[in-house]
Amino acid sequence: MLSDVTTPQDLDDRFRETLAALPAAERRRDPADPVTDDAPLTGAQVLDLFDAQVTSRQLDLAGRWLRSFGEGFYTIGSAGHEGNAAVAAALRPTDPALLHYRSGAFYCLRAAQVAADSTLATDSEPPAVPGRTADPDQDADRTRTAGSERSADSESTVDGAATRDPEPTSDPQVSESEPAGTEPTSATGAANGFAAYADAARDVLRGMVASSLEPIAGGRHKVFGRADLAIVPTTSTIASHLPRAVGMGLAVERLRRLDSAGRRTGAGVRVGSGAGATHAPWPPDAIVVCSFGDASVNHASATAAFNTAGWYDHAGLRIPVLFVCEDNGLGISVRSPEGWVETTLRAKPGIRYFTADGADPVRTYEVAAEAAAWVRRNRRPAVLHLRTVRLMGHAGADAESAYRSPAELAEDLDRDPVAATARLLVGAGVATGEELLARYDETGWQVRRLAEEVLGEPKLASAADVVSALAPRRPVRVARAVADAAARASGPGAGARAEAFGGKPPELAGPMTLAQSINAALADGMLDHPQMALFGEDVAAKGGVYGVTKGLRDRFGVARVFDTLLDETSVLGLGLGAGLAGMLPVPEIQYLAYLHNAEDQLRGEAATMRFFSQGAFRNPMVVRVAGLAYQEGFGGHFHNDNSVAVLRDVPGLVVAVPARPDDAAPMLRTCLASAAVDGSVCVFLEPIALYHTRDLYTEGDGEWLAGYPEPGGWVAGHVPIGRARVYRVGSADDLTIITFGNGVRMSLRAAAVLAEEGVGTRVVDLRWLAPLPVADIIRESSATGRVLVVDETRRSGGVGEGVIAALVDAGYVGAARRVAGVDSFVPLGPAARHVLVSAEAITDGARTLLAR
């Protein structure tokens, strides 16, 4: 029967043979009784696990069937990992989960939990829910932990590893009366069988066939996610969602500890008031769970997440995250060395280690419940190492015979978790093999019926349909949010604002530099957005390498302005999770060059959240990045990086580059408002060389300084996303210079020289690199018919390419020329002048263009 590849037919045949060979128990057991004498699960609960596992298995078989005639587009399945249904049962349905792609059984069980929860709201005597305690105020000392009772500060042994638990938290919202464990009962009464999982099965099948009716991604990808299930969609195959999970844990704990400005409500935690208010989407005592495969423990993003969680735990900051490593021993064809995963996970400082065999549903539930209870009670991170197998290969095209022997495949089949659950039920007398086979066949028939139904459902029909959920822009609402902020700052919030600025608001401080304007705008943002947090390397105590965040920690406290560890992946991950949890994060990346270490957190995680959830989830964030070149006396390619192509390539990402102080504040307000209103992910790229620049033409002229507007002027000075600024020098009829950042100052200097030669120039400051202000580009270029694009980034892949392409697409027929940086890294010292744009090069380029 077993071939050199475990086919769907092999798996189905083997399962049937196993059930047929199971001897009936001597006596029947009441499903309401424990499945074994000392088990924490009843027979009915284990039947629920079995039904969830079987549904997941039949979905995998259906996926291969759909693919066999070209109607299924995703065959990575969950076969062999169905033990994660017991993990779902050990959690609460309101615990947010980020699931990897072998989580079918978890998803099905969670859907049944939530369905039963909805029944709870209408039935007078509802059934209890797997993963939920019947009495939420029962004594924590009743924890069920593998048959033993442990207090929070007792010596405990987890899989042979002796550890000492910390003192229980003194936080009144996680008191000693809170349950430390869970005592689930049946969500379906073991009578409805597949009916409890039908919606989940339809969800998964719709994802497989790319149906536009699929409830989370709408046909854009096959993911596990649904807002009402508290399952956050993730497309990660390499654990890039783990840094986000750590950020979610940090935010959940911070929001839980809010003072009277954000005390508990029935729906969660109310954060602040006014336009900046939001609700935390999960209960205050929630924990975050995230799953991933064993091969992913080696990835940098996983290492970053573990390190960050442990680092904060060591520092005393609580992060309630349960990592679940599902270990089948393979990363496609590459084996995890024997013992490597356990050794690696055990060695993570600050992270409690638990382990279980996914083929043992009772023990998996016991250990998962213990792990979840420990995280919930202590608000600290833990990892559950769940040993699994992989059946039917990595995906439909995977030929296992190239790297696995028939003996290995047979050994994995012997550890089939669905068969293991069947053996438990039959051996306990809860059901017979024939009865379980009937449930299996009924589920298979129902799944096939649903698969045939979803085949006829519509697909995404146009590019507009595809991008509709990517990054909505509502400029009128954003403008209104800015106006409302101004009204609050000058009205009911005026007193708090005056106090925050020490009695001297920034509009009375006189002309400001770019850095000072950003600092003042950040302070105003913190005042208006009570859920806003500012963090990054050196931003708190030091006030930033360039002093941009100086004094903000003292004004707003260490809970809202704090230093992070030195890891850009983790900085962005904290922001992603915090935004998802209801905060408005403003992380700082110290230098643009350092962003490249972590850019997938923006591309693969941040920008895709709305896209793959149709807006059901969002991660608003404004990432401040110090960048670009032209620093005097401090250089090299790490501190003078002019590479922004990767940012402009991310769909939906907003990229802002303020050049002048009087643009910086309104642009930052726009980014904050857009993040709050539309859930936008914005990169606020700050030109380092202009931070403290004061002069434009001559030393001491002060023309690069600007006053900070009072709140009454914020509306008039509002800068919408994608709108440029135009400077007119002389007649402004002869030449258009399109530029941004440092190029604005250099171009204005060049325009002054040209004006002395009788040339009138329009200098267009793009201000926004994504989306480009195309309408402004076309209008100002057509006005003169001569365009000089001044691009301080590189000639290849630089911003100038996008500007020229916009002109061509619009049918521009005038003359055009580029002055751009050389395709080189920026060297140290005076050598940088050879590869960077200069005011002289701009002047020469203009003259050449005018001579045509």
Image (cartoon, grey):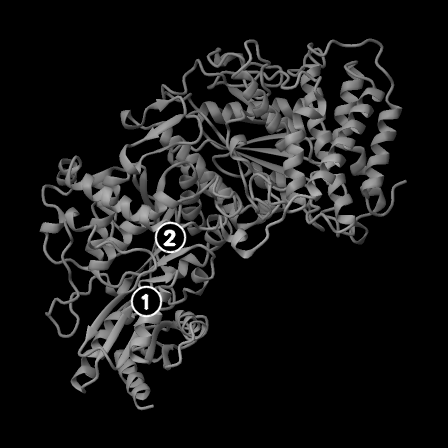
Q: Which residue is identified by label 1? A: 776
Residue found 32% across the figure and 75% down from its top: 781
How crowded is the residue under tag 1: few (<14 C-alpha within 10 Å), some, or many (20+)? some
Is 830 displayed left or right of 389 in the figure?
left
Q: Indicate the quadrant where residue 276 lies.
A: top left
The residue located at (34%, 90%) in the rendering is 852
Identified by mark 1, the residue type is Asp
First along the sequence among labels 2 and 1: 2
Q: Which of the pair 315/714 is nearer the observer?
A: 714
Depicted 652 relative to depicted 806: above or below: above
**Picture quarter with the N terminus:** top right
Residue at screen point 14% across, 67% down: 703
In this picture, is 71 found above or below 616?
below
Residue 225 seen: yes
Camera-nearest label, 2 or 1? 1
Residue at screen point 14% across, 49% down: 710
Give left or right: position of 681 versus 241. Answer: left
Q: In this view, does 642 lie above or below 525?
A: below
- Up/down of 769 relative to 275, above or below: below
Q: In which quarter of the image is residue 25?
A: top right
Outermost residue, bottom direction? 851
Q: Mark 2 points at which residue?
A: 682
Q: Nearer the viewer, residue 745 or 817?
A: 817
Mark 2 Cα-neighbour bin, 10 Å: few <14, some 14–19, many ≥20: many
- Kind of residue at badge 2: Cys
